[in-house]
Image: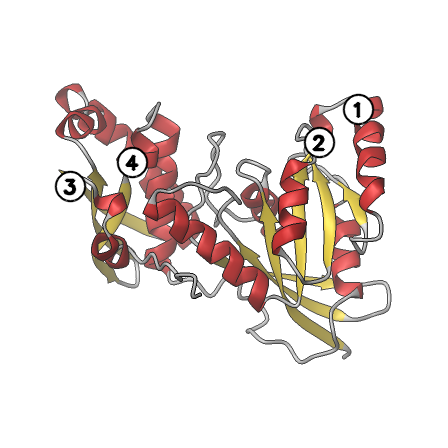
Amino acid sequence: MKTKAGFVALIGKPNAGKSTLLNTLLNAHLALVSHKANATRKLMKCIVPFKDKEGYESQIIFLDTPGLHHQEKLLNQCMLSQALKAMGDAELCVFLASVHDDLKGYEEFLNLCQKPHILALSKIDTATHKQVLQKLQEYQQYASQFLALVPLSAKKSQNLNALLECISKHLSPSAWLFEKDLMSDEKMRDIYKEIIRESLFDFLSDEIPYESDVMIDKFIEEERIDKVYARIIVEKESQKKIVIGKNGVNIKRIGTSARLKMQEVGEKKVFLNLQVIAQRSWSKEEKSLQKLGYTHQRNRD
């Protein structure tokens, strides 16, 4: 059997649809999806098998990254650092741009990335044929920069094979790097954490999801049930009250939604215990961020 394998960094502005694309390719709910921008905070490896037209069985290891953005907040700097590291580690990059975005995000990407890359135009199902053609034409001025330009819709599963075919074409022959049926090398407790965060985005508005995070304090994995004890961390007492809600209605909705998603992903029952704490300025303190698993690579002069 002829095989290929390689790491592919999936890069884009916030809300370009990176996580939706990966979940569609995997046919599973692993990456955090939200209609709110900048929901993804940590790099996640997602493994997609694909047989290309040349007969190669390719193992494409996508590195799902936080959206490219520039802000002074330490948490945001940690997120940008992870995206830059993924670009450095990858054999190939895919820049995902919404059909509704201007070209500034792609121009910023070109200044950051030295690796060969494919430009993918997402969400074409939300635009007219004329709008899609116009955007494709606008990107043609950069034709010498990208390997290929692929319009697609993750939501409608349009042109996804074309993207995978193009990626596989540019990967080097190699033995597979992971077991055949593995979709991600993430630990289940980390996937569960992201599912809880997704539920925060689903049920809470305004700034609260962005000023909150989740800490798994205890994770007990048994044959028929997973037991998860977690804390939702916010910055203000007023936010804590909103997360809990009157008579606990909000935290119950968040917990129920998260637990059902966990059971679908883990394929077993889940017991979920959620607590809410207020910890002022956690997103600005390096020690707090390290405890939550965020790292920041400082620039060296």
Residue at the spot 65% in from the left edge and 70% down from the top edge: 6
Along the viewing direction, whichever of 70 and 158 lies nearer the viewer: 70
Label 2, label 1: how far apart the Cα atoms are: 8 Å
Q: Earlier in the sequence, mark 1 or mark 4?
A: 1
- Disc 3 residue type (three-letter): Gln
Circle 2 sits in a helix, a strand or a loop, which is it? loop
Does the residue at mark 3 contact the one at mark 4 (Cβ under 8 Å)? Answer: no
Residue at the spot 84% in from the left edge and 53% down from the top edge: 144
Q: Which residue lies furthest to the top in this view?
A: 246
Does the residue at mark 2 contact the one at mark 1 (Cβ under 8 Å)? Answer: yes
Circle 4 sits in a helix, a strand or a loop, which is it? helix
Percent across and percent down for residue 111 are 64, 52
Along the viewing direction, whichever of 185 and 119 lies nearer the viewer: 119
* Res 210 label: none
Q: Residues within 10 Å of mark 4 (few under 14, many from 20)?
A: some
Q: Which of marks 2 and 1 is nearer the N terminus?
A: 2
Circle 3 sits in a helix, a strand or a loop, which is it? loop
Instruction: Kindly identify which residue carries mark 3.
Output: 279
Percent across and percent down for residue 253 are 28, 28
Q: Residues within 10 Å of mark 3 (few under 14, many from 20)?
A: some
Percent across and percent down for residue 224 are 30, 58
Label 3, label 4: how far apart the Cα atoms are: 10 Å
Quadrant position of the N terminus in the picture: bottom right
Instruction: Kindly identify which residue carries mark 1.
Output: 131
* Res 99 label: 2
> From what the image shows, is residue 46 above or below residue 203?
below
Label 3, label 1: how far apart the Cα atoms are: 46 Å
Q: Earlier in the sequence, mark 2 or mark 3?
A: 2
